[in-house]
Amino acid sequence: MSSNSVAERIRPVVTLGDILGSEDAPQMGSAALAVAKTPESMYQGACMACHSTGVANAPKFGDKAAWEPRAALGINALLQTAITGKGAMPPKGGSAYSDEELSSVIEYMLSEAGLAAN
């Protein structure tokens, strides 16, 4: 494998400069930036590392049984937990997402588990 192909495989999909629109950073088109801020991409950016594998008892992505009792608490309770953190999960999952963005990620994770946000 060449060093160019390795570099391409490990390069970040989105950088902070892309999101913030830094003049020094490579620019993304507005359509690509919109894609970068979907609930799915935000999940992949901050939540997937733990929720895909269940690290530290995080409810696994798509696991309806694990998410049902949490969904029963309602979206506002889940959002508060995400904002403040719980157990090994840092506040906002270690992200800089707004409360609205966090809410959309929570709704996405619930939806993928076959549940609706209350």
Image (tube, rainbow, N blue to C red):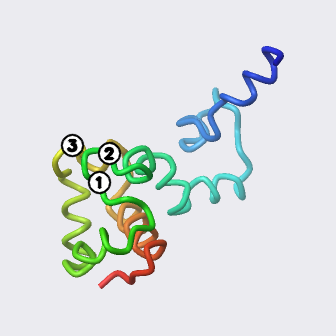
Q: Residues within 10 Å of mark 2 (few under 14, many from 20)?
A: few
Q: Secondary structure at mark 2?
A: helix
What type is the residue that disc 1 sits on?
Ala
What type is the residue that disc 2 sits on?
Val
Q: Which residue is mark 1?
A: 58
**In this rendering, the label closer to the viewer, 2 or 3:** 2
Q: Which residue is mark 2?
A: 55
Q: CA distance from mark 1 to mark 3?
A: 9 Å
What type is the residue that disc 3 sits on?
Ala
The residue at 36%/67% (across/down) is 103
Q: Position of residue 82 (x, y in %)?
A: 25, 57
Q: CA distance from mark 2 to mark 1?
A: 6 Å
Question: Going by the image, does 52 lie left or right of 30?
Answer: left
Q: CB of mark 2 within 8 Å of CB of mark 3?
A: yes
Eyeballing the image, is 73 above or below 45?
below
Question: Going by the image, does 42 lie left or right of 74?
Answer: right
Q: Earlier in the sequence, mark 2 or mark 3?
A: 2
Q: Residues within 10 Å of mark 1 (few under 14, many from 20)?
A: some
Q: Quadrant of the N terminus?
A: top right
Report which quarter residue 7 is drawn in.
top right
Q: Nearer the viewer, residue 104 or 56?
A: 56
Q: Which residue is mark 3?
A: 88
Q: CB of mark 2 within 8 Å of CB of mark 1?
A: yes
Q: Earlier in the sequence, mark 1 or mark 3?
A: 1
Question: Going by the image, does 83 lie left or right of 115?
Answer: left
